[in-house]
């Protein structure tokens, strides 16, 4: 099915593309780097907004293409210009692009509805679906969340935040699985083996697992992942700046072969840093899935 609403969040204004940066690499880095930028207010060199070229993971694609019941995904991006900063508008645009890719995987069963009008009606609809209001101290209420509905089941991601952007695809896939699967989320839980390394790390971060709620535990795991991403981002900034300086020096009258070698080195540095960031995001998803299994009552396993 096609989206029932023609209105989409506006594409963000470009801030320029850094010379000699590989476009596919930047698409990969954009999702993680943007989340760090919005949370900590620092720019990581070489990042830009992801576009249509970013592919969903194979697991997500298999889940979506295997759907045999209708699923409605409701995006609430009610962001009054006077209240929501441009960075948040850009994040909402990236969320919209992600949801479009979800719909494109199975247009027969997935119906995407966008609520992006900053009106009282848009705010009321968001609140009615359990989406959390925020920025109330800055003006009109903002709402940015997703509700997934299938039959009489409904789940909401009540507030989307840029620092959790790397986890959004998996969070949404699990929500879809829970509203369509019987028993809920059984496939996700059985697909992730519980290794001692992962459980030990979870126990270190969450000493009292039994008394920690699922939502609180996931928040702790995400906060730890953000710290790891911040450290990786600082290292990325340092290494890329050094490599970019080498490229600039090589272009200042150096032989063509030396210039090409400098560019190749820059590309390799970017690739290595991208893989580190990707690994952190994957590790977070594994920890969340294992924590969910650890919190599942024995009778439900």
Image (cartoon, rainbow, N blue to C red):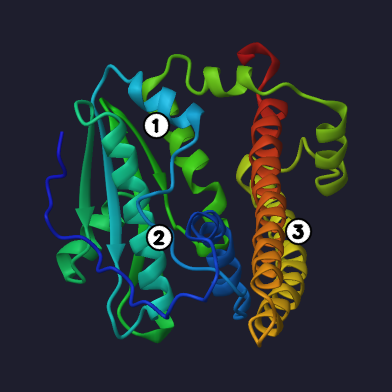
Q: Residue at x 63, y 76 (%)?
A: 40
Res. 131 in view = no
Q: Is residue 115 left or right of residue 149?
A: left
Q: Which residue is mark 3?
A: 228
Query: Dividing the picture into quarters, in which one does residue 91 lie?
Result: bottom left
Q: Callout 1: helix, strand or loop?
A: helix
Residue plotted at (33% across, 42% down): 101
Give x and y (percent) for residue 2: 14, 39
Mark 3 neighbour density, 10 Å: few (under 14) some (14–19) many (20 or more): some
Q: Is residue 114 above or below residue 44?
A: above
* Residue closest to the eye, 180 or 93: 93
Q: What residue is drawn where x is 80% and y is 40%?
A: 202
Quick check: 171 left or right of 299?
Answer: left
Which of pointers 1 and 3 indicates the residue nearer the eye? Answer: 3
Label 3 sits on a secondary structure element that is helix
Q: CA distance from mark 2 to mark 1?
A: 20 Å
x, y percentage for residue 87? 43, 76
Q: Name the residue beneath numbered marker 1.
A: 176
Q: Can residue 105 be seen from the camera position used here? A: yes
Q: CB of mark 1 within 8 Å of CB of mark 3?
A: no
Residue 12's image quarter?
bottom left
Q: Dot 1: few (<14), some (14–19), or many (≥20) neighbours within 10 Å?
A: many
Quarter of the image with the C terminus is: top right
Disc 3 and disc 2: Cα gap in Å? 27 Å
The tally of labels here is 3
Identify which residue is drawn at 30% across, 72% down. Answer: 79
Residue that numbered label 2 is attached to: 132
Q: Are marks 2 and 1 in contact (CB under 8 Å)?
A: no
Q: Along the polypeptide, which appears first: circle 1 or circle 3?
A: 1
Mark 3 or mark 2, which has the lower sequence index?
2
Up-down relation of residue 214 to residue 60 (above or below):
below
Q: Quadrant of the N terminus?
A: top left
């Amino acid at each position: 099915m096609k989206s029932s609403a023609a209105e989409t969040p506006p594409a963000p204004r470009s801030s320029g593309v850094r010379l000699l940066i590989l476009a596919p690499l930047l698409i990969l880095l954009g999702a993680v780097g943007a989340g760090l930028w919005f949370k900590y207010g620092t720019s990581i060199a070489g990042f830009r907004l992801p576009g249509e070229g970013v592919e969903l993971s194979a697991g997500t694609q298999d889940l979506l293409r295997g759907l045999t019941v209708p699923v409605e995904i409701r995006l609430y991006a009610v962001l009054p210009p006077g209240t929501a900063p441009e960075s948040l508008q850009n994040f909402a645009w990236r969320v919209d692009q992600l949801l479009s890719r979800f719909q494109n995987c199975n247009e027969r069963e997935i119906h995407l509805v966008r609520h992006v009008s900053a009106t009282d009606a848009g705010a009321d609809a968001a609140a009615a679906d359990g989406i959390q209001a925020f920025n109330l101290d800055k003006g009109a209420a903002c709402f940015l969340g997703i509700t997934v509905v299938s039959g009489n089941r409904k789940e909401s991601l009540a507030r989307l935040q840029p620092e959790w952007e790397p986890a959004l695809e998996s969070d949404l896939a699990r929500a879809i699985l829970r509203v369509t699967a019987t028993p809920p989320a059984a496939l996700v839980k059985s697909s992730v083996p519980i290794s001692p390394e992962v459980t030990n790390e979870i126990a270190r971060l969450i000493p009292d697992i039994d008394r920690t709620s699922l939502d609180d535990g996931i928040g702790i795991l995400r906060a730890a992942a953000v710290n790891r991403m911040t450290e990786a981002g600082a290292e990325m900034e340092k290494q890329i700046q050094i490599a970019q300086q080498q490229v600039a020096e090589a272009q200042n009258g150096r032989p063509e072969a030396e210039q090409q070698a400098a560019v190749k080195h820059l590309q390799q540095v970017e690739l290595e840093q991208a893989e580190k960031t990707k690994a952190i995001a994957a590790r977070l998803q594994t920890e969340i899935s294992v924590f969910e299994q650890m919190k599942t009552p024995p009778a439900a396993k």
